[in-house]
Image: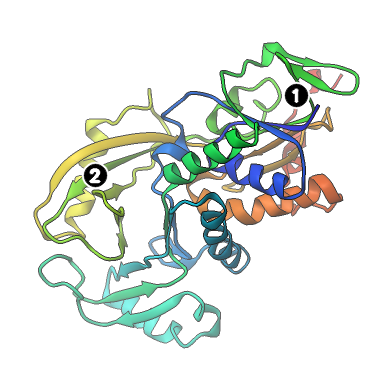
Amino acid sequence: MYDYLIIGHGLAGAVLSQKLLEREQKIMVLDQPDHNHSSVVAAGIFNPITGRKMFKTWRADQFFPELTSFYPELETKLEAAFYYPIGVYRPYFAIEDQNDWEAKKSDAKFDAYIAQTTTSNISAHQLHDPHGGLFLKQAGYVNIVELLNANKKYLIDKGSYRETMFYEKDLKCNTDHFSFGDLKFKKIIFCNGIHAHKSEWFQWLPFHPVKGEMIDIELKKRPETIYNRGVFMLPFAGGHIRVGSTYHHHFDDMQPTETGQNELKEKLSGLLKEQYEIKGSRAGIRPATKDRRPFIGKHPDNEHIYVFNGFGSKGVSLIPNCSKLFTAYLLDGEALDAEVDVSRYYSHYPIQQKN
């Protein structure tokens, strides 16, 4: 019998599988053959300073030390390359931003994240950055597809991975365990992204799915770091430059749209001077939440059913630390942080299901 069945092998399911295996838990990961889930199309950027006004992202001091050690260690374990701490350059929008950050750079709370600032452009022929910008460290990207492929191989070698569709109607709840087909397990964790909002168990949670679109472009000269203002320009190792992303709350499907592509091209024109060639486009649905915080914890009626989901566009940054805390919650009885504990939405659980 397995200790845990993990539904979903996106980034959340993959990282959690490693944390549970480290604690010698017997697990099985079910990966649904849906090649357009958010982890597959995500850019994988981690960036400690975000937003137009460039604030330090939520709990950066907690999450970034964890991620910058976790991913290199996982590369070694999986014998794969997917972690690229290439930094981020954020051109200032206006002279006021320059003045603000010239003052902030001496503030100790930003020491860990500011590599340097500049008050003049770094590439007059390529970028619109007349006021200079901010170079960030502890920033870069994770090639999530490479991570998932390597982790899949690792799990297969351990007999802990299956690719199959999961239908809740086929899940049987027995007195002391669950069963699904020939699998028997004590507990189940839903890490299945946007599919969870249609789940019998977790459809009451306030998911706010967001569609994101990106384009792949080619330039004469590739940047060596990520550019980020209005849109990001991410130079994938050995590949094209990815530009994104849009944020659309209303959508009909998961396909790229002309509207989304035009939005990206318009925003890119405000950052990039150089001519480029579009090589492709992609889209995905982020499992975002109402309050922009993850959903982590147990079902209100069944202490053996859990959710680890809702990381939105910041999964690369949040998941390593959150999976560590969730594992301690599952195995050591440690409390979850109130901001991520799914119990904050127990009042949303339908009354008729409580009886």
Q: Is residue 119 above or below residue 244?
A: below
Where, by quadrant of the figure, is residue 190 drawn? top right
Q: CA distance from mark 1 to mark 2?
A: 43 Å
Residue 290 in sight here: no
Point 68% across, 11% down: residue = 169
Q: Is residue 295 above or below residue 55?
A: above
Residue assigned mark 2? 216
Work out whether mark 1 precedes mark 2 in sequence or the reverse, and give the earlier one: 2
Q: Amino acid at mark 2?
A: Asp
Q: Is residue 117 above or below residue 236?
A: below
Which of the two residues, 320 or 23, is positioned nearer the viewer here? 23
Residue 258 as seen in the image, left or right of residue 133: left
Where, by quadrant of the figure, is residue 170 drawn? top right
Residue assigned mark 1? 350
Disc marking residue 261: none
Which numbered mark, 1 or 2, is in the foreground of this view? 2
Q: Amino acid at mark 1?
A: Pro
Give residue 33's position: percent from left, percent from top.
48, 23
Badge 2 density bin: few <14, some 14–19, many ≥20, Cα 10 Å: many
Badge count: 2
Residue 197 as seen in the image, left or right of residue 173: left
Give residue 67's position: percent from left, percent from top.
56, 60
Badge 1 density bin: few <14, some 14–19, many ≥20, Cα 10 Å: few
Give residue 331's position: percent from left, percent from top.
83, 47
Point 86% across, 49% down: residue = 333
